[in-house]
Amino acid sequence: MCYNESRRRNDGASCTELFLTVAREENISAAARVLHLAQPALSRQLRNLEEELGKALFTRGARRITLTKEGRILKCRAEHMLSLAEKTKAEIMSHAETLEGDLYIGAGETMGVHYLTHVVSNLHKRFPGIRLRMSSGDSLDLANQLDSELLDFALLFSPIDPLKYNMLPIPYENTWGLLMRQDDPLAGKERLVLADLNDLPLIVSRQYGLRQLLENHPAENTPRLNVVGSYSLLYNGSLMAEDGLGYVLGIDGIINVTGNSPLCFRPIDGLPKANMFLV
């Protein structure tokens, strides 16, 4: 059947590749031209796939098609499948007697990435056949890619399950603080204390909110929290702060707050350091 990836078309395109091409082009005729297929043949393949799965994958409009909920799920899984297949093929085809190939590393937004890039730079000078493939994301995304074997290494913030992963600590600590507008009254302070956070409209990382950071603090020292939003990468969080949506909890050294920046960063005393590990 069409979805069985052990059976491929005569021209070498798998059903996954057909589906992803249609999803990308959002038009069956355009996808057929890209794939060098007749449109009826491609439409038949898609119908076979939908019949096999028992779900509609596309909503067909007059000029474009869109993915259904089930189609979006399949697209995400299919992209991972192809990426893993390409990575596996490259590993098998690499020459065992030389150190070469693609090195897949994932990292979040932190100056600690310099430790990785410095090491890989020196490694590349010795072995120019090594190519760095860097992915960005937060720890949740990167851990999922690591578990799916789409990454060789990932730079993750603690806490990390030591029973699940092999890991090495990175000798760099990040400081937690608030991003805010330069004209905010709190910007007049060089450092903040936990009491300053009472009832502030806070925008936090989707993986690290203040509740997690304060879980070992005495209850009487815990500020009254007013979380109004979240982000996955701090750059988007900084735009929220710039537009006055709230105060963004993040780590130092990521957003440039020098020169004419409308933002400033104020560290918060009483919060633990953000430690990183190469996993």
Image (tube, rainbow, N blue to C red):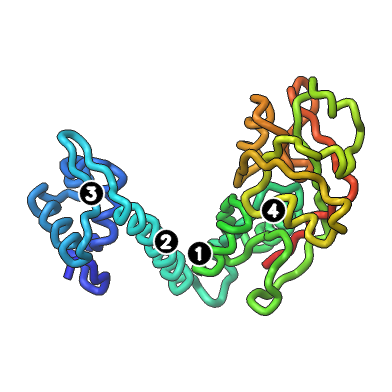
At x 40% / y 67%, what residue is drawn? 85
Q: Where is the C terminus found, in terms of image quarters?
A: bottom right
Residue placed under numbered mark 2 in the picture: 80
| Mark 1 surroundings within 10 Å by alpha-carbon count, few (fewer than 14), some (14 through 19), many (20 or more) | many
Residue placed under numbered mark 1 in the picture: 150
Q: Amino acid at mark 3?
A: Phe
- Residue contact between numbered discs 2 and 1, judged by CB atoms under 8 Å: yes
- Residue contact between numbered discs 1 and 3, judged by CB atoms under 8 Å: no
At x 28% / y 47%, what residue is drawn? 67
At x 41% / y 69%, what residue is drawn? 89
Task: Provide residue 214's location: percent of width, then percent of height.
Answer: 80, 55
Residue placed under numbered mark 4 in the picture: 208
Q: Amino acid at mark 4?
A: Tyr
N-terminal label among 4 and 3 = 3
N-terminal label among 4 and 2 = 2
Quarter of the figure with residue 8: bottom left
- Residue contact between numbered discs 4 and 3, judged by CB atoms under 8 Å: no
At x 25% / y 63%, what residue is drawn? 14
